[in-house]
Image: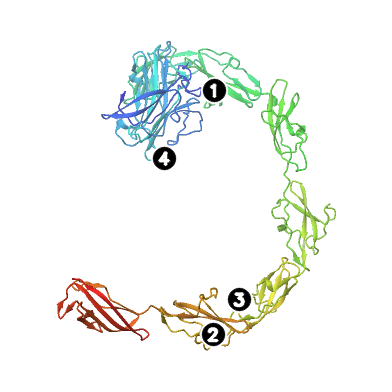
Amino acid sequence: MIYRLFLVLFIASFVITTESYAQSCPENIGFENGNFQNWKLFTGVLSMENNQTSFTLNEVAKPATGRHTIISKKNLVDAYGGFSLIPPSGGNFVAKIGDNGTGSQVDGISYLMTVPADRPDFTLTYQYAVVLEDPDHEPYEQPRFIARVKDVEKDEYIPCASFEYVATSSLPGFKKAEGYESVIYKDWSPVTINLSGYQGKQILIEFISTDCARGGHFGYAYVDINNVCGGPIAGSTYCRSADALNISGPSGFQDYNWYNADRSVKYGTGQSINIKPKPADGSKIVLDLVPYAGFGCPSTISTIIKGVDYDLKVLNKNVVCQNSEIDLLSDKYILNKSADFTYLVYEDKDLTKQIGSLVIITGNKTFYIKATNNKGCESIVPIDIAVYEVANITVNNPAAVCYSESVDITKNELVVGEMVGITKTYYTDEAATQVLADPQHIKVSGRYFIQFSNQFGCSKIVPVEVTIQEKPILKITNPKAVCQGSQVDLTAINNFEGSDATFNYSFYEDEALTKILSNPSKIDKSGSYHVKAVSAAGCIVSGQITVTISNPPVFTVNQPARACYPDKVDLTNPALYTEVNGHFTYTFFSDETLNSPLTSPKAIAKPGTYYVKATNESGCFSSAKIVVNYNEAPKLVLNAPRAVFDNEFIDLTVPEITRGSSPFVKVTYFEDQYLKHPMQNPVRVNRAGVYYVAIQSANGCISSRPVTVTVLPQPKIIVPTAFTPQKETNNRLYPFLVNVKQLTSFRVYNKWGILVYESAVLANGGWDGQFKSKMQPLETFSWFAEGIDLFGGKIQSTGKTILIL
């Protein structure tokens, strides 16, 4: 099928006002069974061709997740428009068609029904609200919602009853969704489809929602049809006791004009009017209907005014068991039920909270039943439903008891209410399947259940909360040990940190808690004492608390051995102290009054008398002297050896190296300053670097110093094996000097032994390949060089080089 696309997202709810000609609609047309029973469900995908959009719907066996949804919660609101998903005058269930997903989805539902043969005037009224994503596409690409009615016999859609609702921001009533720039919505609005003249015919009701044809924007709908259908004009049949006529036309038209039969009197305009005084019985009222552009056809309908009498009678009062389910529209409760009337049940006298006829009674309550006949007359009466006295029984929770006690829930004083003829049984579960073995001695906290039953078979299960106080926590931290002569406060709060905050404490000498301490805040004797703690709930626990009165530390000092300067003495060395009565911590001072602490007791560099303070865990302390003595380290003088070439050796053991040092008994040689790696052969040193010499005096003190060994590469005269005098680079032949401080001669000979170049100063930067101003040919030449090395020795070198042109 091909449809011109309009931008639409539409939420529709078919309802019939209570004043209309009332008649039951087909089963579950308003989803009041809470499902899609009798409805057919469809899904499909949009496609575009030649600036037109088409889709094909495929029937699905069950609701597509998120695309065919039944909604019943009245507190839900639309995520974009913020309006209620259940229309105020709708039923209890709504069907949602489509979702806010994208992908060019098409979703639909349909219902096949037969217009009653005895209803020549028949209407369906729906409410709709609109929410859509407005991508500003071409009209044929936009999301849409289609509501249409098909004459099955003719296989064609009824023009004045089928609409494509185009929702754009330019349509009246549309608003931008707050927080969603591209989403617009329209709140609930009513529309009526006039099916007058189709009595006895089958019609197919269809609702279809689509995304945009490009696939990136959504469209969805909500639909609800009430279970009351009727004629186009509501209220034309009235109760004779009324002094005025309230009459309403079908919803969804732009203009309404009301007249008498010959149009000599215009009663008014608008969908609903009040005519007072009311016209006489049998009078004809004419209504001209003008639809909104594009939404129906102009038409004229009429109705005959008739008066009827009906006084609804219900059961005066009924008493039932609590939680019983009753049918308030059954013959038991409606005493003069008539097939000509439709009956609705409400929870409030203002008739704003409609409910189903099946009600579970949880307490005394008044309901309201409204009867409306097919002539529009209505009667409203209250009906009182009460529960048997057993339903009014309540139970007070017993007082909490301590962990060592039990609770009796059989006591009559716990029960509030009349107990005559009532029996009690006790259970551990709400379903009353697990009998409580000993309800008089409950020792575990929890919820238990009492079932009250009367002679009529009514029963009520009431929970009762039993609280067995947990054993309060008494956490004792023994007070810190103190020194002899000090006192301990047992009442200090930090002794019980982590305990129950409500405790009241008392203190005793004995575990039986019979000998109370007269002054627990001033304990001066070591030993075990006992505390009794009473919580705010009166629960008692007890425990032991230990007091320690400590003696001062007893220790001896093992005086440190004489040190060699500049070594340092570590006063913190545990080997210096022998502990007699415990383990101590030590601090160190330079004065006997212990007022000047040492900043570096691990590195004492000066001889003298120092003082050590030993402190035990109780904070008690004592002190002692510690004496530091030093021996002088020997004087070490090192004379650096002369530098050598790498084909020679240096002997570091010769006396000349340590000449000028003080007397010593031992000398050693090392490769590192920490004297950890002795030299393998200090007599023959051939590697340049820094070495370390250490001498030891007769008193065992050691001094060390670094000595630098300089080893130079052998002197060399190096001449390139080839050169190119006619090139830009490498165009001179000259020697390179290694550890040669002076070149004394450089001579070049050709293959005939003729001297072609000689110089001691490398005139012109070396030989340029010419002899007697003439470039020499390509051949091998011999060279001879002499020089003086860094130490004044003579060095000679010869070789050959190739002249390359």
> Percent from the top left, x then y, of residue 187?
42, 32
Q: Residues within 10 Å of mark 1 (few under 14, many from 20)?
A: some
Q: Residue 624, can we see it? A: yes
Mark 1: which amino acid? Gly
Mark 3: which amino acid? Ala
First in sequence, mark 1 or 2: give its number: 1
Spatial CA span between label 1 and label 4: 36 Å
Looking at the image, is 460 positioned above or below residue 688?
A: above
Colour convention of the picture = rainbow
The residue labelled by disc 2 is: 636
Spatial CA span between label 3 and label 2: 24 Å
Quadrant occupied by the N terminus: top left
| Residue 334: quarter of image | top right
Mark 4: which amino acid? Glu
First in sequence, mark 3 or 2: give its number: 3
Mark drawn on residue 469: none
> Percent from the top left, x then y, of residue 732?
22, 76
| Residue 384: quarter of image | top right
The residue labelled by disc 3 is: 603
- Viewer-nearest of discs 2 and 4: 2
Spatial CA span between label 1 and label 3: 95 Å
The residue labelled by disc 4 is: 178
Q: Residues within 10 Å of mark 2 (few under 14, many from 20)?
A: many
Q: Secondary structure at mark 4?
A: loop
- Viewer-nearest of discs 1 and 2: 2
**Drawn side of residue 33 relative to residue 102, left or right:** right
Spatial CA span between label 4 and label 3: 76 Å
Q: Residues within 10 Å of mark 3 (few under 14, many from 20)?
A: some
Q: Residue 265, can we see it? A: no
